[in-house]
Amino acid sequence: MATTDSPAQATMTTELPAELFQRLLDESSDTAIIIDQQGTIRYLNAASQALTGFPPAEAIGKPIDGLLPEGLAERHNGYLLNYVSGGLGSSVLGHVRDFAIRHRTGDMIPIQLKAVDLGVVDGVRYFGAFTVDMRERRAEEARNAALLAQLEQQAMTDALTALPNRRAFDAELARIAARARRNQSPISAGMADIDHFKQVNDRYGHPVGDLVLCEVAKAIERAARGTDFVARMGGEEFGMLFPDTSTEMARLVAERMRKAVAAASVTTPDGDIIRVTISIGLAALAPGSAPEPALASADAALYQAKEQGRDRVITAD
C-alpha cells in the first residue's frame, strides 16, 4: 500500500498487531467504509451498519451504488475508473464535505464525509471514507432557524393587536417603494387615528382601551384588501400602505375601513357598549421619491380630518 508515513512512524505502526487497527475501526463511533476500485464494498464497521441499516451479509461484496444518492450512483463508477486510470483528478478525496447516504429503507441520511485514497494492495486500489451522522445537527439547526424566525416575527409584530408594528411598516414601505421605482407604479399611504380615544381610557381604564384597540385593528384589517398593509404605529395610531393604488382607489378602501370601525363595538365588563370612529389621512407616494414627505402629507391630512369633525377620510392636496 502506498504510504506517506515517515520511517519513524512506519516503525511505530508495524510494531503494533494489525488486529488493533481492526478493532479501532470496528469500535469507532464514526462510520468507516472501504471500497475497491470497482466500487465494491469490502468493509464497513459497526457504526456504518447502524447508520445504513445494512448488515455485513447484505453489504460486503455489493456495489457502493446502493448507498449513494440517486443520480450520483450512475456516475460514480465512471469517476472511479477515470481516477484509477489517471485521467481525472478528484475534488472529493481528502476533503470534508456535506453528503448524503442511503439507508436500507431508502431514506437519505445527511452526513459529513471524508474520503481518502488508501493506495494499492496486490494490484487493487482501495478507497476509504469516514462519515459523521448529521441528522441531530441538522435538526438542531432547523430548531434554531425556527426559533430565530419566531423571534424575528415577534420583533415585527405589535404584541397587543397582533398587527405588524412600526418596524415592520418601515420595512414594508421600503420594499414596496423599491418595487414601485422599478415598475413606475403608484403607492398610496395612509395614517389613521382613533377619535377621542383618551376619553375611552379615562372613563373605562386602559384594559378596556386595549380591547377597543384590538377591535379597531380587526375592523381595519377585515376591510383591507389582500395587497394592503396595515400596522399599528403606536398608541391609537395606525399606518396603511396601498401598493399599486392611486389615491382615488385608496380613498375608497379607506372609507370602507372607516365604516367598518364605526360599525364595530366593544362591550365592557359592566355591560356598556363602546363604539369609536377613526380619522384617516391619505397621500400619494410618487415612484422614485423618498417616502418621508408622503408620510408627512398623510399625517397632515389626518389632522385636517380631525379639525373638520373627525370620522372622515381626507386626501392630501
Image (tube, grey):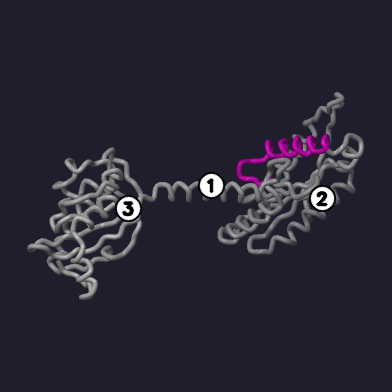
Judge depth for marks 3 and 1 and give the one in front.
3
> Looking at numbered disc 1 in the image, what kind of residue is underneath it?
Ala
In what element is the residue under mark 2? helix
In what element is the residue under mark 3? loop
Q: Badge 3: few (under 14), some or many (20 or more) residues near its Cα, within 10 Å?
A: some
Residue hosting label 1: 146
Among numbered discs 1 and 2, the one appearing first in the sequence: 1
Residue that extends furthest to the left in the rendered view of this protein: 122
Measure how far apart labels 1 and 2 are at the Cα level.
Answer: 39 Å
- Give the answer, above or below, for where 246 lies relative to 162: below
Residue 42 lies, in percent from the top left, at 16, 51
Residue 87 lies, in percent from the top left, at 15, 68
Residue hosting label 3: 30
Residue 71 lies, in percent from the top left, at 25, 50
Q: Badge 1: few (under 14), some or many (20 or more) residues near its Cα, within 10 Å?
A: few
> Looking at numbered disc 3 in the image, what kind of residue is underneath it?
Asp
Q: Give left or right: position of 289 versus 75.
A: right
Magenta residues, start to end = 207-230
Measure how far apart labels 3 and 1 are at the Cα level.
Answer: 29 Å
Residue 269 lies, in percent from the top left, at 84, 26
Q: Quadrant of the N terminus?
A: bottom left
